[in-house]
Image (tube, rainbow, N blue to C red):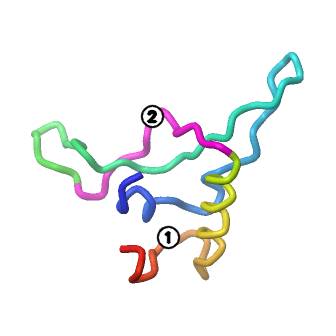
Amino acid sequence: MRPQEVQGLRSGCCPDPEAHRDGTPGRHLIRSRHYKNVTADDGHHISAGEDRKVPWVAIAPVVHAIRVLVRIVPNSSEAVRLPPWLR
């Protein structure tokens, strides 16, 4: 993930996986925004990015780390603000 994509994470971006119809565990999905090559109809770059159409598939330790990072943010509706040592 790029730093901007990490900063675009919101509370609830990593829901618990849903089990498949046959009972096997589902995959962990991460929903966020992306910024690279996001353009308006007129061709200008959109710096605010847009929601990813396809979520990332991640392993459980990654999802756990993101959930901890999201909990650090005092207001869950805000984007994640990385500490200076992670920027």
Left or right: 38 as drawn, with respect to 57:
left
Give residue 38's quadrant in the image: top left
Q: How many marks?
A: 2
Percent position of residue 27, x then y: 69, 34
Left or right: 42, with 79 as reference point: left
Q: Residue at x 60, y 61 (%)?
A: 66
**Is 68 in the magenta?**
no
As drawn, the residue found furthest toward the top would be 22
* Position above or below: 59 against 13: above
Q: Position of residue 44 (x, y in %)?
A: 11, 47
Answer left or right for 41 relative to 35.
left
The kind of residue on which mark 1 rests is Val
Mark 1, residue position: 80
Disc ID at residue 22: none
Mark 1 vs mark 2, CA separation in Å: 20 Å
Within 10 Å of disc 2 (Cα), the crowding (few <14, some 14-19, many 20+) is: few
Which residue is located at x 58 percent, y 77 percent? 73
**How far from the left and from the top, in percent, is residue 64?**
69, 58
Give the residue at x 66% y 68%: 68
Residue ID at (45%, 60%) = 6
Point out residue 31 in the picture as x, y percentages from the top left corner.
Answer: 54, 46
**Could you tell which of marks 1 and 2 lies nearer the N-terminus?**
2
The magenta region covers 47-59
Name the residue tied to disc 2: 53
Q: Secondary structure at mark 2?
A: loop
Considering the image in quadrants, where does the C terminus appear?
bottom left
Mark 2 residue type: Lys
